[in-house]
Image: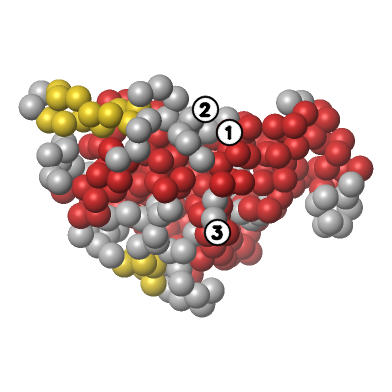
Amino acid sequence: MNDFAQPGETVELPTLQGRLEQSDVTADLTGAGLLVDRVELIARLYKEHQSWAEVREIWHSQRISERGSRGSAQKIFRILRRRLQTGASHLPSVPQLAEILDACRGERAKAQLVYLYLVEADSLVKYVLHEILRDSKPDANQWDLSSDRLMRILDEFRDADGEPLRYATSTRKRLVEGIRSVLHEIGVRKRPYDDEGVVPTLDREVLLVAAGYSWSKEGDRWQSSPVGLLYLFQPVHHLDTLFDRVNADPTWSTRNFQNQVMLHPEDDPFSFEL
């Protein structure tokens, strides 16, 4: 089926070079990686207690973090909580995320969902991701994810005032390895030592969340800028197939707009049947 609005070769993420405020840029990824199992546990606790204060107390009292000092545990909890709170503005609410993670059949799918919250909350990770994907051609199936390439992207960073990153080389190296590790967890790098990225498979839950995320960010014309799918390294020539899969779900429907068939959710795009 090829009746949907055609993105063509115009689908491209904008550069964030020179657009970010230095105050919005953090090295949080060096303090807490993707940590899927801990995000899942925090989401479950929040779904149960509906209170971040209670979740924080349980986190510490049970020594869930299992990492060093209480100060270290607090830092990890603070980073993960911020990711979930920030991401929930355009992604599933934290209780919804807990339910969706429970429904996922594999660890990779869970990692892909948690990764979307990381990208939405972490402007530096988003900057690197935009530069990686902008390097590729519209029909790309592979990406250069070598340490050297990612380090150059960080070295080339300029904020809204034209200033470079204010992090030491050692911190930048840790950021690079953190990003490479995340891309391995979501299936873009097949093996931990691979420098080449490939297109990962998206399970139903991940696809619907990525579509809903794109719609939340871009509105009814999200198919022309399906950011959630692009962030998950889905090339342009795969999009029609993915749109077909979204259209097959009863929580989504189509309508004609300016002689194009547009996909939109019937209600809450994250309330699909699990």
* Mark-to-mark CA distance, 2 and 3: 25 Å
Instruction: Give yes or no for contact between labels 2 and 3 (Cβ–Cβ under 8 Å).
Output: no
Residue lying at the far left in this picture: please name it: 259
Q: CA distance from mark 3 to mark 1?
A: 18 Å
- Name the side, left or right, on which 73 lies relative to 234: right
Q: Is residue 210 above or below residue 189?
A: above
Residue at the image position 35 percent from the left and 38 percent from the top: 249
Which image quadrant is residue 172 in?
Answer: bottom right
Q: Which mark is residue 106?
A: 3
Q: Which image quadrant is residue 251 in?
A: top left
Residue matched to label 2 = 89
Residue 217 in the image: state x and y as whole percent: 38, 30
The residue to which callout 1 is attached is: 96
Residue 139 in percent (x, y) is at 20, 59
Dot 3 or dot 1, earlier in sequence: 1
Amino acid type, callout 1: Gln
Residue at figure coordinates x 28%, y 29% from the top left: 253
User: How many residues crowd mark 2 within 10 Å: few (<14), some (14–19), many (20+)?
Assistant: some
Task: Give the camera-side residue of 183 and 48.
Answer: 48
